[in-house]
Image: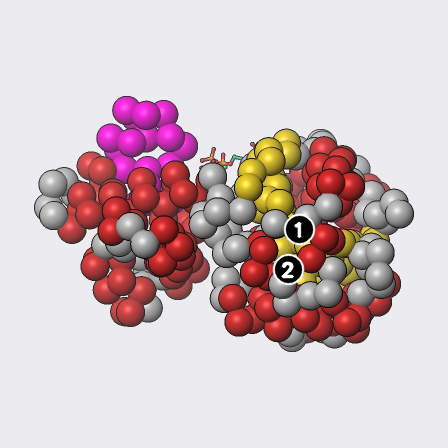
Amino acid sequence: MKVEKIMVVGAGQMGSGIAQVCAQAGYTVTLNDLKLEFVERGLGVINKNLSRNVEKGRLSADEKEEILSRITPSTSLQDAQAADLVIEAAVENMDIKTKVFGQLDELAPEHAILATNTSSLPITEIAAATNRPEKVIGMHFMNPVPVMKLVEIIRGLATADEVYQEIEDITKRIGKVPVEVNDFPGFVSNRILMPMINEAIYTLYEGVATKEAIDEVMKLGMNHPMGPLTLADFIGLDTCLYIMETLHEGFGDTKYRPCPLLRKYVKAGWLGKKSGRGFYVYE
Ligand code: CAA
């Protein structure tokens, strides 16, 4: 069945970005979160992004309104009853994800595909919380979603070929580039990115250089748009720690041990840009 209605669960940074790009591509979108204020915050970000596109002459004011009118706020998972595809972008926690997927499995129509935007958790385990593992798949968007081209598509052990194909087609329709990967801890993106960020934190921890120097080396020396410590703040230090722990546990290899400084910052509540302080201070 052709996907027309998409429900996005989680209206934070990732969820709101996913809802925006889906609505821009013409899909009817339901944006869901636990509280209306969270959904409204997400819609506010989408509104701001679209307004910038209008100012830059990429969209007309009417087109902006049309896109916004395609997004319906929701605070009940019951709304999954009308969805052809659900993209879950809730917090990175296996207990929460399996609970949400169990509920979605009961509520969503039989034909609906259930996708997760998890950045490192096993798709196969999330799929096992449902009675439709063949219709469960990973759709890993990058932050900021409206800007970044990649969607890492992760097949779980049981994901059906036609489900993979449908998700690949949708990814292209929303203007992104799909890349297929298999279900192993961290997939490809975070298996490579996070150890680099973790090593940058070790480099700071061991006093090899200042945070500014580390970022400058990687920006100017490797042409990265952001230095690794700035990027860690941008992603969220709690997310970075969680992904390192997932790699460490998943592979049982000490090369993935999270840097003690990363743990310390997270324990202090220094979570990066979102909390106003991480490796840098944000006004
Ligand atoms: N939402 C929407 N659009 C945004 C945005 C946001 N949060 N941030 C920037 N943009 C847009 C700007 O409006 C601007 O658009 P136009 O040029 O079309 O007007 C464009 O992006 C460039 O922005 P800026 O000129 O302000 O700044 P910049 O050139 O420094 O780019 C950046 C900002 C795109 C974020 C760039 O610094 C970058 O690519 N950083 C690295 C991002 C990255 O690595 N992301 C992956 C993180 S890992 C992940 O997401 C996966 C995971 O599981 C952890």
- Asked whether residue 244 is in view, the answer is no
Local secondary structure at mark 2: helix
In magenta, the rendered stretch is 215-231
Q: Distance between the residues labelled 1 and 2?
A: 8 Å
Which label was assigned to residue 274? Answer: none
Residue nearest the observer in this picture, 193 or 99: 99
Residue under label 2, please give it.
127
- Asked whether residue 178 is in view, the answer is yes
Quarter residue 214 falls in? top left
Q: Where is residue 264 in the image (x, y as percent from the top left)?
A: 23, 64
Residue visible at 75% across and 37% down in the picture: 165
* Type of the residue with mark 2: Ala
Which residue of the protein is positioned furthest toward the front in this rendering? Answer: 158
Residue nearest the observer in this picture, 36 or 134: 134
Residue visible at 41% across and 49% down in the picture: 234
Residue under label 1, please give it.
158
Left or right: where does residue 161 sit relative to residue 116? right
* Type of the residue with mark 1: Ala
Quarter residue 96 falls in? bottom right
